[in-house]
Amino acid sequence: MNIQTNQQKTEAEEQLGVSLPTRRVESFHYTDLRSLLRSAPARLKEADTAGDNYKRLVDAVRLPFFDGRFFADLVDELPKGVTVSSDAVKAGGDTADDVLVAINAAGEGDAVSVRIEGDSTLEKPLGLAHVANSPVASACYHSVTVTSGSEAHVIDRYVSDAGIGHLSSSVTELSLEKGAKVHWFIIQQENSDATRLARMNVNLEEDTELNIFVLNAGGRLVRQEIMVSVNGENANLAIKGVNLVGDGAHIDVTTSLEHNVPHTNAEELFRNVVAGDGQGVFQGQIKVAQPAQKTDAQMACNSLLLTDDSNFSAKPELEIFADDVICAHGATVTDIDDDQLFYLRARGIPEKIARTLLIKAFVGEVVEELEAGDALEDAFAGIIDSWLDENI
Amino acid sequence: MPAVQETIDTVATLDVDKYKYGFSTDIESDMAPKGLSEEVIRFISAKKEEPEWMLEWRLAAYRRWLTMEEPDWARVEYPKIDFNDIYYYAAPKNFEDGPKSLDEVDPELLKTYEKLGIPLKEQEILAGVRKHDEPSQLDEDPSDNVYSSGRVAVDAVFDSVSVVTTFKEELAKAGVIFCSISEAIREHPELVQKYLASVVPVSDNYYATLNSAVFTDGSFVYVPEGVRCPMELSTYFRINAENTGQFERTLIIAEKGSYVSYLEGCTAPQRDENQLHAAVVELVAMEDAEIKYSTVQNWYPGDETGKGGVYNFVTKRGDCRGDNSKIMWTQVETGSAITWKYPSCILRGDNSQGEFYSIAVSNGAQQVDSGTKMLHLGKNTKSRIISKGISAGRSQNTYRGRVFAHKKATDARNFTQCDSLLIGDKCGAHTVPYIEARNSTAQFEHEATTSKISDDQLFYCMQRGIPEEEAIALIVNGFVKEVIQELPMEFAVEAQKLIGISLEGSVG
């Protein structure tokens, strides 16, 4: 790490073996990691496979990770065309922008590679099931390759029980080869003491189709980075997300799309709900390189603030070097519309229920458009409902 | 407009010969020694016959500046500036004692005004051809001519000094003080001391601090309570002498219930060396007051590589200090090799309003990093941002803005629209907004688009018999119209012409 600092190392920096960026680092402008993460839990030693959190969200083929360790003997029967091995090598990161990668490389946890090949179309979703059972800092790494013509749904899920102050770092390298089609769901339901630092790097080749959905419904300090590099013509990308920021939580979703070749499409839509004294952050960057003519990239970020102590910061950026493009972004921040609330209350619906209904409708729109299948959409709606029950 | 490779080529070959303000006027200058030191600051202060407190203030700023680092976060690239290779003070020698009347004005200078494009009617007044209340011979039908009053007071700043300020007496009758800042320091020290650096603190940023140490002139406007300034006020800034930095300082104070509209225009000669311009503009609007500040910036943009162009590092900020006050910034930025400028509003008073309308045109190797900040601190404050960027050639055009609502700024409301138009495939257009809501009643909307001129629009026009070049001009004019219509009439015409010149070859 080449973050210049004369300051004394914080406890967290000692523990993680990495210098943490302050808000002076532009990409961490709204998430001052150094002051938000003063201390980190002990490093992972033994993973704990106990507890009943290792449950299916929907019927899926699961690859279990407990406390960042991969348990090959607990893997469900793999469908044809899927190979899993623990021989992946973690990548390092050496700039302040890549600090989450550096934390991952320096941390304890397994590196697993998954390969989906041979024109496979997986019938059941593949589940990367992460369960944290111990108050430790863990760092797991996945490298997933979907080869030419294959199709898959992947549920990348993170769960932990209340009261465990763990730190989970994860880095995912996803590569889609020509013509591959993937739905990727990042479902984060960690407890309200948890810290989650996640990075996903994506490479898209020609004619690929990738739909990413991020659902943050937990965590105390969460930073989810998604960096997509579009390197093949006619690639289609959609990143959608719902961030539910509870009292005391700080949730940051940072995305960066690099369009490097002509004729690619991208759509980004995030809906955020901030309760209590939560802090929500969205940073979205769309970069269009000079050769990437005919790029069509749209980004929207809408936020609802539920209380006067909640806040939201957005930085939607466009960086365009090609002229024949259509790029746009929109961002809004507001509270629940009084007229809508009045409409419902005038029909005899109590205020609390009316508010919940409106919030559900606000975020439900994203889930409905996922085309992820009824089972998954119902499961996501269920997660949102239970978050609303607890937080509104 | 993809089919028109020709257009792109024309823009590419467009060269600075189009810059019609590239002359320099041969007037003997009185200069401070090159470089920056406490001695130079003492020299400037002595030249300006400033009181002791002002000198101390400058020296304190200089010492502070020495400890600061040049900011590098903007999307602009330029070789490191050698701050010791610049003249910090240059005054046309003939005016060292200050002109007593216009007759004493050097004819060379009047010629300069002409070249500066100061509207004809103003020149008549400047040249003493007519009095402002006489109808101009240029008016065909005075009844419907917006210029017929010709009532624009002008302060012309030439390198480091203000050479002439017109209409002073009439303004004084209304109680309005309009003079150069140096004069204000001497004549109205109580006002200057009270308000100077109250909006842009001395240590605000690197260039503002430098400006505080070495500023040489600029305008000062004070509009007393309840007065509606009877005419538009205007300043023309001109860098003339070689290797000279221009550091002007403008301070405008609108007391309770007053109104003032202020226009600013800038040009510079063509040079081989890059010229530095670091200005600070402070606006203070008290209760129910309104300030309208318009800029047409046409500093020399440099040759096709940006060489010789003006580096424009400007800090402009308005403070809506009183309730129901309003500040409106309108800018047309077509010049400068580098523009680094973020006219901002601090919406402190309840119900105060801030507006920002901007057109930034870049061509050749120009780099523009401009935008605004709207800081909502008072209750029920409103702001509106309309920014239109047009990039052509190999230029980079960035909008960078921040909208912030404090926890106590209940019912803050912002609307932001940033549109970029790209002409040619070698240029870049970027948008970097920061949106920060700290309370739930704030309502923020932001939208940004980037595109080229759409084929459909072009086809629609051409199909109706409008030639391509004219069609593009029409579409570009439509693109910037929302901003142009916010400019005072005198400037709107000039601005439209400037956009035409800047994009000549692509917009006809």
Image (spheres, coloured by chain):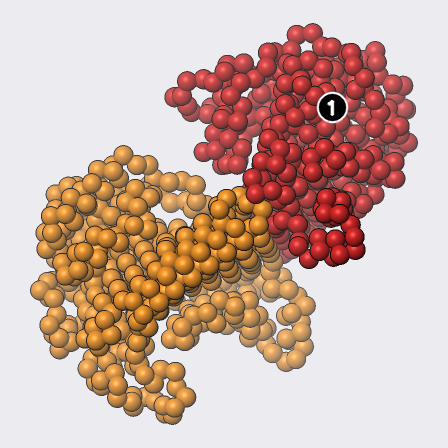
**Residue B66 as seen in the image, left or right of residue A36:** left
As drawn, A128 above or below A354: above
Residue B3 in which image quadrant: bottom right
- Judging from the image, mark 1 belongs to the subunit labelled A
**Residue B195 in view in this figure:** yes
Report which colour depicts chain A: red
SS at circle 1 = strand
Q: Is residue B449 above or below residue A204?
A: below
Figure quadrant of residue B127: bottom left
Crowding at label 1, few (<14), some or many (≥20) Cα neighbours within 10 Å?
many
Horizontal and vertical percent position of residue A45: 66, 7
Front one among A114 and A346: A346
Q: Nearer the viewer, residue B402 or A51?
A: A51
Q: Position of residue A379 (x, y in %)?
A: 83, 34
The residue singled out by tag 1 in the image is A159
**Residue B366 in view, yes or no:** no
Which residue is rendered at x = 88% and y = 36% of the image?
A375
The colour applied to the residues of chain B in this rendering is orange
